[in-house]
Image (cartoon, rainbow, N blue to C red):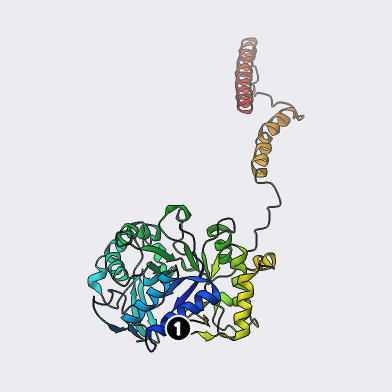
């Protein structure tokens, strides 16, 4: 992985402003918040193919928001001039609704809908899927001068993990394709979906990006497993919400009564505590609220100063925040090796039991039945018969005893 160049932000407005205004938004984000990584959210037309080469304007399929090619280019130029990187958002698990030609033999996991309208068809990310879609998106991103592609996902939508989803294989196959176009790549591991412990050292992604919906189960994985403080260099995403009630916001369950700005500051502080960054600011001086990035809120001056205080000082309260978002697992009450010791102690018990059983007082041995003699010849014959049976019984008992002793010795 390459290290982050700074904080991470986003852009969503590609129409209704001049190129100079676009450049000014980038400058504000860079100077006020130290942002050097920008995600271009919903800047494409659809999900199957990018806009045609030379097409100057289009509408994004999600909410039909207009996009101007020259505004995208202005953003990209301004970012490059600041030494930052621009990442084109591309959905790695989608096609336009009903695009059976592109889907071909890929399993269709269902449809993602917006306001009851089918927005996209969902397919699992795999190596073969990357080879199918990466060339077209890499060509478009390179033509506009982007630094790389941000491969977004929908998490385990439609139980993708049970239908062959292989995010590592997807990234492994996409890597040479985007690299040949002069690009890099990142990926969104939604609630940990698709994460692989090999990724940090694989060179397949520039840095990890986790969109966390489950606190603390998944946020603990992020801070302990994927991006611990010893390495850092990742993007922590956990939307602060639009009000303090947090209705229907699974990522904010347990934070009822906490203002979104309070959560934003805490989560950015936690990211800094662990040498990571937090997705919060976009479109100049606005802050994110939900997973729909354009639904932003204007930052007040005092809120900007509060964020700058988090970024400019040594983070404090780290232990308290970690106890909420990444609590350590309690140590086991016994050492890890104690079950083996217990098993070893149990093994001799059967042998000990047999040894004690042989030494317990027993009832007198049963007498062998003898036929009542009728004459001296019969008496002598009965005596010989009883002696033979007794010897046979003694030999069997001795053999059984020797077998038990051999078993215990083994």
Drawn side of residue 275 relative to residue 101, left or right: right
In this rendering, the answer to whether 189 lies above or below 402 is below
* Quarter where residue 114 is shown: bottom left
Pointer 1: what residue? Answer: 294
Q: Determine the residue positioned at 57% across, 58% down.
A: 228
- For the question of whether residue 153 can be seen, the reply is no
Q: Residue at x 37, y 72 (%)?
A: 88
- Seen as rendered, the residue at the extreme right is 361
Q: Percent from the top left, x then y, of residue 257? A: 65, 83
* Residue 107, percent from left and from top: 31, 67
Location of the N terminus (image quadrant):
bottom left
SS of the residue at dot 1?
loop
Q: Is residue 326 above or below residue 94?
A: above
In the rendered view of the protein, which quadrant contains the C terminus? top right
> Which quarter of the figure has residue 68?
bottom left
Neighbour class for label 1 at 10 Å: few (<14), some, many (≥20)? some
Q: Work out whether residue 206 can be spotted.
A: yes
- Where residue 105 sits, quadrant-wise, is bottom left
Along the viewing direction, whichever of 218 and 160 lies nearer the viewer: 218
Front-most of 393 and 59?
59
Give the residue furthest to the bottom: 16
Q: Considering only vertical position in the picture, is 38 above or below 366?
A: below
Q: Is residue 226 left or right of residue 273?
A: left
Q: Nearer the viewer, residue 164 or 153?
A: 153
Tally of numbered tags: 1
Place of residue 81 in the rendered image (x, y in percent of width and height, measured from the top left): 42, 71
- Tell me residue 237's x, y (percent): 52, 71
């Amino acid at each position: 992985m390459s290290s982050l160049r700074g904080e991470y932000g986003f852009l969503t407005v590609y129409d209704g402003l001049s190129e100079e205004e676009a450049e000014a938004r980038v400058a504000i984000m860079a100077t006020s918040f130290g942002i050097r990584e920008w995600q271009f959210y919903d800047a494409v037309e659809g999900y199957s193919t990018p806009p045609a080469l030379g097409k100057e304007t289009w509408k994004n399929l999600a909410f039909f928001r207009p996009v101007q090619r020259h505004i995208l280019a202005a953003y990209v130029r301004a970012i490059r001039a600041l030494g930052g990187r621009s990442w084109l958002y591309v959905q790695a698990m989608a096609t336009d609704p009903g695009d059976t030609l592109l889907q071909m033999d890929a399993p269709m996991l269902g449809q993602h809908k917006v306001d009851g309208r089918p927005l996209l068809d969902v397919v699992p990310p795999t190596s073969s899927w990357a080879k199918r879609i990466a060339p077209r998106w890499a060509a478009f991103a390179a033509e506009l001068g982007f630094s790389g592609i941000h491969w977004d996902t929908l998490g385990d939508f439609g139980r993708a993990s049970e239908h062959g989803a292989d995010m590592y294989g997807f990234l492994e196959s996409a890597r040479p394709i985007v690299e040949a176009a002069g690009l890099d790549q990142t990926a969104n591991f939604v609630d940990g979906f698709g994460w692989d412990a090999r990724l940090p050292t694989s060179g397949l992604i520039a840095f990890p990006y986790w969109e966390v919906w489950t606190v603390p189960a998944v946020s603990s994985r992020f801070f302990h497993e994927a991006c611990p403080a010893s390495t850092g260099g990742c993007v922590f995403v956990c939307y602060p919400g639009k009000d303090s009630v947090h209705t229907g916001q699974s990522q904010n369950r347990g934070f009822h009564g906490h203002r979104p700005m309070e959560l934003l500051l805490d989560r950015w502080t936690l990211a800094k505590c662990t040498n990571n960054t937090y997705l919060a600011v976009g479109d100049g001086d606005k802050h994110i609220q939900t997973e729909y990035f354009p639904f932003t809120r204007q930052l007040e001056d005092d809120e900007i100063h509060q964020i700058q205080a988090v970024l400019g000082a040594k983070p404090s309260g780290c232990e308290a925040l970690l106890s909420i978002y990444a609590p350590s697992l309690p140590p086991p009450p016994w050492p890890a090796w104690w079950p083996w010791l217990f098993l070893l102690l149990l093994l001799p018990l059967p042998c000990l039991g047999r040894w004690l059983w042989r030494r317990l007082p027993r009832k007198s041995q049963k007498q062998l039945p003898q036929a009542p003699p009728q004459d001296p010849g019969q008496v002598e014959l009965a005596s010989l018969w009883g002696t033979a049976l007794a010897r046979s019984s003694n030999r069997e008992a001795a053999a059984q005893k020797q077998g038990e002793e051999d078993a215990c010795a083994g």
